[in-house]
Amino acid sequence: MDADDGEGFGDFRTRKKNIFDDDVSVEAAKKIITSARFDDDDLDDDMEILDLGSSTTSVKFSAGTAPSSKTMPDLSSLATPASSSVPSPANLRINPSAAEPRHSFGSFQKAAGHVRSQSLTIAPLKSGGDMQFPKVNMLRGSNTGSNSSLTIEEAVGTMGRKFGSMDVDQMQQEIIQLRKQLLAARKERWTKMPVDLTLRRIMKGEPYSLENYRALEDKLSLLDKAVTLMDGNAITAAVLHLKKTVKRATFQQELMLRPVAANHYLAYLRGHFEHAELIDTLSMLGRSEEAAIVKYRLACSTGDINTKVSSLKACLRAHFEAEPSLAGDASLIREHIDLLERQRPIEDSDARLEAEGRTKVFLDFPRRFALVNMPVTTTLFYCCLYHYHLQENSFASPVSIKKRHELPERQFVWTAVSARAKAKGWTDIEQLLTAKGWFGGKKLKAAIGFGKVVDILHRFQAPHDILAKYLELVEDLDTRLTLAKKTDCKKAMIETLVKQKDRAGVEEFARKYSATIEAEYARRVLRDEAIRWK
Amino acid sequence: MDLHEIKRILKDHLTHLLESMPDQKDLVIDPELTKPLDRVAGIAFLKEHGVDKIFKLEPSQKSLPGRGKRIYLVRANMLNMKYIADQITAERRLGQTREYIVIMVPRRLHVCEVILENEGVFGHVTLEEFRLDLFPLDTDLLSLEMHSLFKSFYLEGDYTHIHTVASSLVTLQHLYGRIPNVYAIGKLSKMTYDLMKTMHDHEEGQQTKFSIGQLYIIDREVDFVTPMCTPMTYEALLDETFGIECGVIELGAEIVGKQQNVKMLLTSNDPIYTEIRDCHFSSVFPFLSAKAKELHAIHEKKNSLTSIGDLKNFVTQDLGRLKQQQAALSHHISACEHIMKTKMKQDFESAIRAEHNLLEGSETRECIAYMENTLYRQDPYLSSLRLLCLLSLTQNGLTPRDYKTLKTDFLHSHGFEHLATFFSLKKLGMLVEQEQTSKVAAVKLRRSQFRQLANKLGLVPKSGEEVMTKNPTDVSYVFGAAYAPLTVKIVEYILQHEALQSFEDIGRMLPGGIHTHVKYRAASKGAAKTTFLPVGQHSPRTVLVYFLGGCTFSEVAALRTLAQREKLQIIVATTAMITGPSLLDSVCERK
């Protein structure tokens, strides 16, 4: 029924439009009313210029680059004269025929945006226009037909070269079709085009208009067909059109039924930085976890530490605690807040101490970064380096950090050993690794394995005697030997070789390092008859 | 097949756009487009067509000096439009009037126009589009270099870029004929194929001659495992260590031991590079040292030159080539050294062992312990994340306990902000938690997915099986004979089972399945029915493999090997060249 209406009004409106368009002079309007057919033909001529170009386009290359490649040499050589005769390049669009009454139509289009004038078919149109420019001055006001015939010749020439004998029927058919297209184009401003046609135009990058879709059904059909077609640009255009023209409740209701459209709307909101609406829409769509994450991300990007803490708290209350399925993340965010609240006072006091320049540890190891916003592990390392001996009730106490964030023993040992090794606190490391035995006996124990301890100590350039002490505790002999070699602990190397009963190994050592003190030790070992070699 | 035709057409189009604004003008370019434009056109080309000054589009720049005519060449996105609008508004406020053209790449988008309209500058600009879609990076490699596609489609469900991919295929087929046989693998591939078909349907005149016989469209979602594996071929390692952008690598001054950074174009024009790019890293160094000796020998020749004629020959012919090769050689050696150094520092052996175990599905507990260690010692977060994803992908998710521990450890070591990273990876299906319903059955069922594929396609060579890394025929050499890229194996499988026409058995195991559209069959009797005709005798054996969501150099190397072995010509197209870390980084929370 809609289509019928459109058709019915078509002729009427065509005529009416022409009057409206040609409002420059009443005479012109009268002439057009009396000879409507002539007008059609006249315009059709124009269209032929345009569409012969575009027909090569459609055969060869959709982006209009193919014809441009052909017309290019002309284009570049003519570019300069064209500019001298035309006040501004914007006028490139106004081709010779448009200089006549249709001018007003041109500028009218402009109001609707270049959407209308820029298109796939416009490239050849423009090149056609350019080609004619040098002649414009001479020919202005004269019959445009001569111009167009010239272009046709050229166009046919190129087509002939490309396709040999082209079927005349086919060309005529094309003309008929183009004529139809033209009619449709002229009506389009006033009547709504079928949804499919509009979508095709969007997809091809041709001018289009959505404002004539006023019935909700039309808007939805536009949206649904865009989704089926899978042209994202059209989907976004349709969804924004819907959003702009219906009340919020209706919009949301329809969006809930259309996940793809919803995604496009959300992408638009993200790109447009409309965070509040983004979060609302996500919640409305039942995507509460995503809403919570968006809010969290927003809170995290806050620069000022105090504001950040309060926005994190707000986010926790409003989103994470409200949703039982997000309990895990909620506890992580609580950790995040606590971490920031711990870092704040430490940073304040340490920055002051460092500035005063009287605290030794800050002179020995100048702080390379501010503590606030650092991860837990980095904070632990920091506190192990600068505040290792603090009581547990202090903010900066490593043990308190370990407790609050429930850090695994292995991680704690790893970080603490590294930090103390950097500070050359060898006794701290020994204490850390000392475990109390059953009857008060003491024993060294490392959750990460002594191999890793040696690795870390070596990285921080621990002295050999310290290294040797922990090397001895590496249980696997092969690993111990590799580590001893890597850390260049010669004594440990010999001892390990002896343990392995590897006489050849010790002999080789004695040869290789004959000038060292350890070589003497190696030779003594070799003389020792108590050792049973392999 | 000459891919340079594409470049010519792009240049013509660009010329047309530049000349549409007569006289001299300034060009403001989106930083993301500088490298692609360098490959397609180059500065000299721009200058030839009236470009005077070239600026980068930067948000910090509120207004720009320069001429009264200006062209903006930018990717079509809202942010760029806002920057442009701000500049125009500011300049108008200063009383400067200019002509502006905004060229959107690869096409004009509704949202962009909305922004320009909202900002009130719509009336001051002329809008154009530059359909920069696929452009050649090498003689067998095409790319859109559109890195935003991955995040936008897979993470946000935005369809906008599908159009670009589909229309790039349409463009390609305008040049090289309609491809008769299409295999669309995965959901996005199917969508792309459908949209491409719609675009074709809108055209009149069907082309029937083809010079590309087969098209494989592969959705990255089908295979996230491959980018998560550590590459072993030289080119892939270069990409991961230094980053290859549009075929150009930049080596730091300290690496090459020079005053300034060195830029090198890596294509098959470089004879040394062509020989080593796809080699396993272990054989690159021996080759380079042999080459060095060879060059040295040629150099020595100058001492034995007796006649002036010989000397002249040497100077005119050998010397220039020698110098060039010498420079390239020394850069490659420096790059190699740097790669080795980086690998040693990162505890490479253990990382590789963990990775191989995950691929084999053995020693999982040990792997998890290793991952915890990398987190405790704060290794670069992308390498830890890569292993985590590999664990999830090969096991079809982590157990709730492992998920919780590893996630917490990760957040502790790299910042709580990564909560959002984990959310994104979950949404992508790259790092997920197993569902807790009826544990045993669920785990069994889901676990089998990657394993099933691995068994069916022989992705993981049996231990002990020798894969000749020096003269590879098995594509698994690209990952040190530990894993053959799934994407390439699917192509190989379809090639070998072409006669079946239906690959349901494999398709069932892949998200989105395989959609087959076969119109041309060389050997069949029904050939008369088809209207498709090959241009040359090689056409049916010319294959285009199009990766959606990105392709790694490991996959390119594997496909080159496959092409050589099966006597095919394979052209690789992709939406972007990626590495595992770059892929992860694009969805990671930045700090």
Image: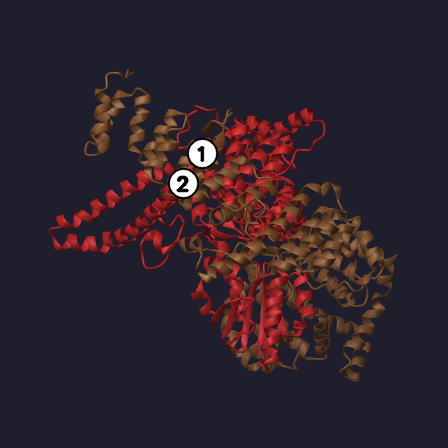
Chain colours: A brown, B red
Q: Farthest residue toward the left?
A: B306
Image point 82% across, 77% down: which residue? A33
Q: Is residue B537 visible?
A: no
Q: Is residue A378 left or right of residue A247?
A: left
Amino acid type for the residue under numbered disc 1: Ser
Count of marks, rendered view: 2
Query: Residue B292: percent from the left, percent from the top?
Result: 26, 44
Helix, strand, or loop for circle 1? helix
Image point 75% across, 44% down: which residue? A323
Residue A426 shows which numbered tag? 2
Q: Nearer the viewer, residue B392 or A529?
A: A529
User: Are there few (<14), some (14-19), or many (20+) residues within 10 Å of tag 1?
Assistant: few
User: Are there few (<14), some (14-19), or many (20+) residues within 10 Å of tag 2?
Assistant: some
Q: Nearer the viewer, residue B308 or B156?
A: B156
> Looking at the figure, which quarter contains the N terminus of chain A?
bottom right
> Looking at the figure, which quarter contains the C terminus of chain A?
top left
Q: Nearer the viewer, residue A139 or A483?
A: A483
Which residue has dot 1 on it?
A: B350
